[in-house]
Image: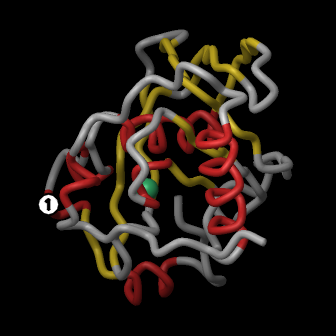
Amino acid sequence: MTQPCEIAQLGAKVLRQHAEIVQHVDSPEIQQIIKDMQTTLATTQGVGLAAPQISRLKRIIIVASRPTTRYPTAPLMAPTVMINPVFEALSNEKEKDWEGCLSIPGIRALVPRYKAIRVQYTDEQGNPVEQKLEGFVARVLQHEADHLEGKVYLDRVESTEDIISESEYFKLFTRREVSL
Ligand code: NI
């Protein structure tokens, strides 16, 4: 039985370190990290999680899109485990939209992200996967991939005026939004 893990909070060194490439997807260590991440994410309102957020410096993320107020057409997808994800932008076009983070409670910010990307990763069974992602799902992936480089979304805001408190954010939207 896997217990949810504590989520590292901004200021924790682990959130500022590079995660290591996963060599053996089928190793008990990696499979346990995946289980821990799934269990932990399921206890939150999050739509994504990166291994460094549970203090494991491995290149593993989970993307778990669901429709939200701002992204009503976002696909409802089963949480997808992506190991060693690498992405490229399909065009230089970026758009700004709101993000939050389970490691940075209490605030939201407008973050520019590529609108469309192509991602390659290994799934939890060790199979190579290539996908094109756009909009909200592409945003979640870029946010989680940043965690693998020791970056958080606040590093990408264009102006400190684009950072607001969560309570003010909730006034902008009618219902509670999720965190990445
Ligand atoms: Ni995050």
In this rendering, would 104 be left or right of 75?
left
Q: State whether residue 90 is above or below residue 93.
A: above
In the rendered view of the protein, which quadrant contains the N terminus?
bottom right
Neighbour tally class for label 1: few under 14, some 14-19, many 20 plus, Cα within 10 Å: few
Choose top left, top right, bottom left or bottom right for residue 27: top right
In this rendering, would 8 be left or right of 49?
left
Q: State whether residue 32 is above or below residue 146.
A: below
Residue at (40, 89) in percent of width and height: 167
Q: Position of residue 4 (x, y in %)?
A: 62, 74
Q: Position of residue 139 (x, y in %)?
A: 53, 40
Q: Amino acid at mark 1?
A: Thr
Tag 1 residue: 160
Choose top left, top right, bottom left or bottom right for residue 23: top right
In this rendering, would 9 be left or right of 179?
left
Ligand 1: quadrant of the figure: bottom left
Q: How many marks?
A: 1
Extreme residue toward the front, this view: 28
Residue at (33, 61) in percent of width and height: 109
Residue at (38, 85) in percent of width and height: 168
Q: Position of residue 142 (x, y in %)?
A: 47, 35
* SS at mark 1 in the image: helix
Nearest the viewer among 37 and 70 is: 37
